[in-house]
Amino acid sequence: MSKQKASISPVFLRVKAFVLDMFLIAIPLLYFTTYVVLDGKDNFQHNQLAIFAVWLVYGLITSLFFTFKAQTPGYKAQEIYLIDLKTGKKITFIKAVLRYVIFVFFGPVGIVFCLFRKDRLNLHDILTQSAAVIKK
């Protein structure tokens, strides 16, 4: 059996995948928390624990998608896979969670990082030795 060839996904496809994941995963979580768990927009805006919980659950859901399928719904729509650079296989759950934590804490700096690198990897990809790839 031959190995499949892959290349680093273009930044534009990763941005589109991220926006899709926001609409398909984060927005339903935010809506559910705001109108079912809490009493509405005002309560949600003043409840930092609820906001933290939504983003924690979002991170866990995306980490589970990356662990079991190597794709979130947004990545699937763009035909992108997240792989471990060392093994070429799906990343572990711990790496996926660590990747999300780095993404959250380094935010814009970590994202803009890919614009200055030849291989187009983000900071969270470099630190976790993972890469978003497309099949050739």
Image (spheres, rainbow, N blue to C red):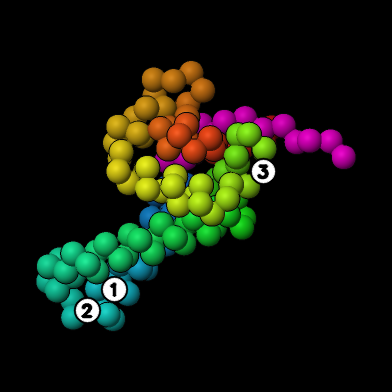
- Tell me which numbered mark, 3 or 2, is placed earlier along the sequence: 2
Is label 1 in contact with label 2 (beta carbons under 8 Å)?
yes
Q: Amino acid at mark 1?
A: Thr
Q: Position of residue 50 (x, y in %)?
A: 24, 69
State which mark lies toward you, 3 or 2: 3
Q: Amino acid at mark 2?
A: Leu
33 up-or-down from 122: above or below: below
Q: Position of residue 104 (x, y in %)?
A: 32, 46
Q: Which residue is mark 2?
A: 38
Q: Amino acid at mark 3?
A: Lys
7 up-or-down from 33: above or below: above
Dividing the image into 4 quarters, which one contains the C terminus? top right
79 and 51: which is toward the camera: 51
Say which residue appears at 79% left-offset and 35% top-offset: 3
State which mark lies toward you, 3 or 1: 3
> Picture quarter containing residue 107?
top left
Q: Position of residue 29 (x, y in %)?
A: 35, 68
Say which residue appears at 54% left-offset and 54% top-offset: 93
